[in-house]
Image (tube, grey):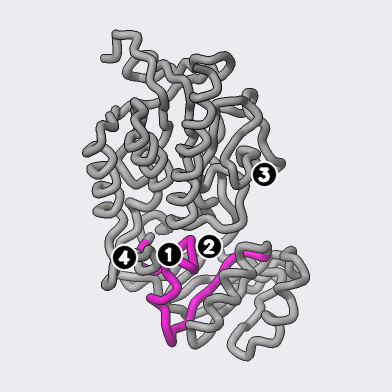
Amino acid sequence: MNNVKQIYDMIVIGGGPGGYTAALYAARAGMSVVVLEKLSAGGQMALTEQIDNYPGFVYGVDGFTLGENMQLQAERFGVKTELADVFSVELDGNVKEITTSDGVYYGKTVVFATGANPRKLGLEHEAEFVGRGVNYCAACDGMFYKDKTVVVIGGGNSAAADALLLSKIAKKVILVHRRDTLRATKIYHEPLLNAENVEFRWNTVVTELLHNGNKINGVNVKHLVTEDVSVAECDGVFISIGRIPATELVRDKLELTEDGYISADESTKTNIPGVFAVGDVRTKALRQIVTAVADGAVAAFFAEEYLAGIK
């Protein structure tokens, strides 16, 4: 239990790659740092069995191991990790107050690294077959489907970008969208329509995930006008219907975008001095481990600059 009113230089909320990089850089700069994580190191990354696009690992690395190593590396330089749920935050003033299941923590700066969760379809077997045919990130998992058939569900920018990427890897891409045209920006339309291995299923939704007991092998697709149901055989499904940022704690405290992400540019600064946002929870063009890590380093730099100004 945290009973002593220690005031940390930095409190990091979330133990993913962005959070632990911020903690590592801050600790190496001589700052006292605590990371508050409710589950385990790595965040969403810890659920990924094989990561092949993070530099330095020739044969890839599983997300749990990478997250654990990031934690151990930060702790080597004095970072404390506390497993705790954060209930509320008070961010005004020179000392911020974070109320958790482990008591109240005080810090001069706060870094939000709470991430964003993929929006689920809510179908039976969806959670059960994650990593066995159900995917949420083409950039992360697309290479597992080289020369195979995949289904992409969605019609926005993320779905179009995923479908375009997968069209260069997979033998065939079936794009399932509930409307009769893409919602994605026009830049995606022409290359997708011209891709010979992309098949469009307009005005349709996936109603069932099919499997052989070990992995996904198809989906049931329902036409919203005719109500006809057909089977699309595939080796994997990419669900690309958006993400839900974990910003419940700051909904009335920090400036958010229309989509609910924390408004923070490449400086990672929010609208409150001394408060930063890193990784998937902030506005950004690309949400990947490597960009979250970059955010963490930037946040530590500007946190150090902020602390120099208030001392």
Dot 2: what SS? Answer: strand
**110 and 282: which one is in front?**
110
Dot 2: few (<14), some (14–19), or many (≥20) neighbours within 10 Å?
many
Q: Are marks 2 and 3 in contact (CB under 8 Å)?
A: no
Q: Quadrant of residue 13?
A: top left
Q: Report the Cα–Cα distance between label 1 and label 3.
A: 24 Å
Q: Quadrant of residue 83?
A: top left
Q: Report the Cα–Cα distance between label 4 and label 3.
A: 33 Å
2 or 3: tag closer to the N-terminus: 2
Residue at which label 1 appears: 134
Disc 2 or disc 3, which is closer to the eye?
A: 3
Residue at which label 4 appears: 56
Disc 1 or disc 3, which is closer to the eye?
A: 3
Q: Which residues are magenta?
A: 131-155
Q: Are marks 4 and 3 in contact (CB under 8 Å)?
A: no
**Type of residue at label 4?**
Gly
- The answer to if 87 sits in the magenta stretch is no
Q: Report the Cα–Cα distance between label 4 and label 2.
A: 28 Å
4 or 3: tag closer to the N-terminus: 4
Judged left or right of residue 193, residue 12 is: left
Answer whether residue 249 is visible to the viewer in this image: no
Residue at which label 2 appears: 239
Q: Residue at point 41% right, 27% down? A: 11
